Image: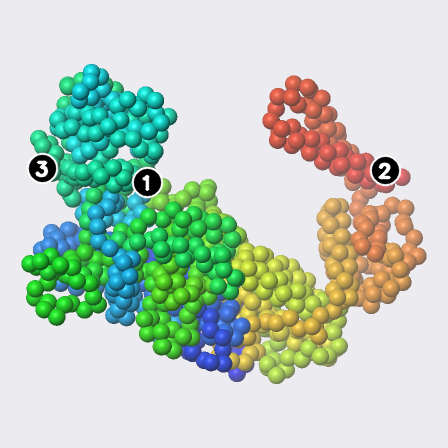
Amino acid sequence: MEDNQTNLPPKYDPTAVEKDRYQFWLDGKFFEATRSTDKKPFTIVIPPPNVTGKLHIGHAWDTTLQDIITRMKRMQGYDALYLPGMDHAGIATQAKVEAKLREQGQSRYDLGREKFLATAWDWKEEYAGFIRAQWEKLGLGLDYSRERFTLDEGLSEAVKEVFVTLYEKGLIYRGEYIINWDPATQTALSDIEVIHEEVKGHFYHMRYPLKDDEGSIEIATTRPETMLGDTAVAVHPEDDRYKHVIGKKVILPIVGREIEIVADDYVDMEFGSGAVKITPAHDPNDFEIGNRHNLERILVMREDGTMNDKAGKYAGMDRFECRKQIVKDLQEEGILFAIEEHMHSVGHSERSGAVVEPYLSTQWFVNMQPLADVAIDLQQQADDKKVHFVPERFETNYLRWMENTRDWCISRQLWWGHRIPAWYHKETGEVYVGKEAPVDEENWQQDSDVLDTWFSSALWPFSTLQWPDTAHEEFKHFFPTNVLVTGYDIIGFWVSRMIFQSLEFNGERPFKDVLIHGLVRDAEGRKMSKSLGNGVDPMDVIDQYGADALRYFLATGSTPGQDLRFQYEKIEATWNFINKIWNASRFVLMNIEGFRYEDIDLSGDKSVADKWILTRLNETIEQVNKHTDRYDFGEAGRHLYNFIWDDFCDWYIEMAKLPLYGEDETAKTTTRSILAYVLDQIMRMLHPFMPFVTEEIWQHLPHQGDSITLATWPVVRDELHDQQAAEEMNRLIAIIRSVRNIRAEVDTPMSKQIVLLVKTNNEGIATQLENNRPYLERFCNTSSLTIGTDVASPEKAMSAVITGAELYLPIEGLIDIDKEIERLKGELEKLNKEVERVQKKLSNEGFVSKAPEKVVEEERQKEKDYLDKRAKIQERLQELQG
């Protein structure tokens, strides 16, 4: 136990508050899970950031939510593990390292595989250090004793285990398929590594001549260079225009090859001419049609995007130069008869920016259908078996992706990554797959490719916990994990893969809940991008406002599943909120100086304000628990904000000053106890949102334990709940607010004393108010206060009605009646003009019938508002003029 020794500095300085605090937590090992059998485990594994650069604002949002959940669970008595780690990010990291080498005038081939990988590991160490520094700045309660990396030894073993097992089950195979190909980096890409952009292109309309008949068949393409690899023309079997030519041949222009006209249901009769060219080696849909009709696959392009020998006279040309030349040649031959401008979506490599080529390649694939079927079935299981998506609507996205999944291309033509555990016999070409190299290794050549980054990250929830050693205490205690927090944009690419791999290898879900958040957008709702220059560096925000302000804004700024608009005004509002907390805490600390934890006693006689604030505390704990259990941190934050700002700071602290500055030592001790207790409970509830400032304040409060991170979470205490006192206090607040509103209305400052008459509905309310007369006298600043059921209404008075009572403030002495009459007459004149204007507008049939409904409704609302204000002013004038 540490008693509060010094008061807080006069001004809240986030830099000073946050400095060295993280090291204090690490030194105390407060974030390290214990594997205690006395505690229920609670696990969140961090979605591993790529070791390619700085964390962006999306990472800050994602990890803040995770940290809130784990800090809260730790305080609630769970053995909470928030496991850190990073992803090797195959193509992304290799592209960065290669770019660095190019600046030095080198390539990976100059270094060779071994030295290049050593350079990549150096890069990883450097950037891992940057990421850890950013985690520290955000205040993430990570258990670094368990930190993992997707290329570390243990995870590499897990990857081999999975690959070999799936291969042996026939769920991994090697074959030809159309994949996304990046000609710049010369590797296959996953769908998520392809960015689709709307580009102005062209439709090239051509006529392929029929072989044995006069005439031709019209087709259109956006990629005329691929026609060199055409092996068919397809039409719909029910298309009457072409039924007579199905099975016949056309002559492929320029090449002169005969290709067949085939019938296939895939063809859309309504689109274009209803006939399409089929290039099985250069289009995924054509590939499927080719399989159905046993068509030859002719690849006419090299891996670097230049045309190969199958392209005839165009061999060696860049694909886009070839396009220009072939268009020219086709025009000269009269084959190409029209070029139509056309906006279409074109895939670009996320890493190199190159236009992605659908490309026939021999790759390794996962047979997805059997795995997807099991994952889909899981969602029909009982609640304690299935994966819960929050919000629930995202389960539909997940199932849609699973139901329409294609076989997954898992090989990448890279050096940085998990090398495929497959070897080819140098003489026979036989394939060997195993966790270790064949015994006679010198006769075998290992596959030079590596696995898709998503292959290893799909194992993340269990490979990080010592799997495949399922007997390991780490795995037995912490798996399955509890919550995955991630964005909706990678449900298909990552969430789904973790689910089916966990089901395949562990027979159960990898996590109970998936909390989905949106994207962080700029203040105008635009996606953040380098081209727009609207990105926000979370570290810059922390430098200016502190981590606590950023975290609270990120956590409470939207509802689950929705995008978040980043607005500096809201960060500033949060900073002001923390200032309010800081100043309130300073007041409390100054008034409880020397108070010890053992001195806190809530059993004494309490005022109505004391009972009310403890009741409101109970209600707030209940609401915060309810909303955080649903992961609705915005609503939890709203309840906390209202309780702290309105109830505690604006009302209770002000009312506490009466006993604190009075002569009753017993009342003073009770008030000090309640101030200390409520502020302590506030700090605990706020701690997951604002870890730094709450630890700082809590350390100054009378407390037990070394850190607020291990303090117990607040619980509702029924013995401190007093509904009657809450109702009494709400009535007092209503009276004080009404008096303040009347004062503002008639421009009477709080410093000026007033006469107040309160007429109650019954004696019970009168007695309650009488018992709390000091509050009314103090906060209404009365020269005379009359309370009773038989209070007569003065002739000229301002009035207000609250539940159970009527208030009267005699006008004499409150305002200058003549001046007020003149002011009100001026207001009435203005309102008369506004009423006349709006009614004239609304009586105009042309306006009402032609203007948008919203505009007309706005005018009607204005009329209602003006009439209401006018009636009130007329009523006031009548009162004043008698």
Marks 3 and 2 sit apart, C-alpha to C-alpha, by: 100 Å
> Marks 1 and 3: which is nearer the front?
3
**Which label's residue is closer to the chain start, 2 or 1?**
1
Q: Is residue 258 left or right of residue 516?
A: left
Amino acid under disc 1? His
Which of 761 and 357 lies nearest the eye of the viewer? 357
Residue to which mark 1 is pinned = 196
Residue to which mark 2 is pinned = 878
Marks 2 and 1 sit apart, C-alpha to C-alpha, by: 70 Å
Which of 724 and 228 lies nearest the eye of the viewer? 228
> Marks 3 and 2: which is nearer the front?
3
Which of 608 and 461 lies nearest the eye of the viewer? 461
Amino acid under disc 2? Gln
Seen in the picture, residue 60 relative to 519 is either above or below; the reply is below
Q: Kindly state the secondary structure of the residue where label 1 is placed.
A: strand
Which of 269 and 442 lies nearest the eye of the viewer? 269
Amino acid under disc 3? Asp
**Residue at (10%, 63%) from the top-left corner?**
444
Residue to which mark 3 is pinned = 309
**Residue at (36%, 49%) from the top-left corner?**
405
Marks 1 and 3 sit apart, C-alpha to C-alpha, by: 30 Å
Quarter of the image with the C terminus in it:
top right
**Residue at (80%, 66%) from the top-left corner?**
772
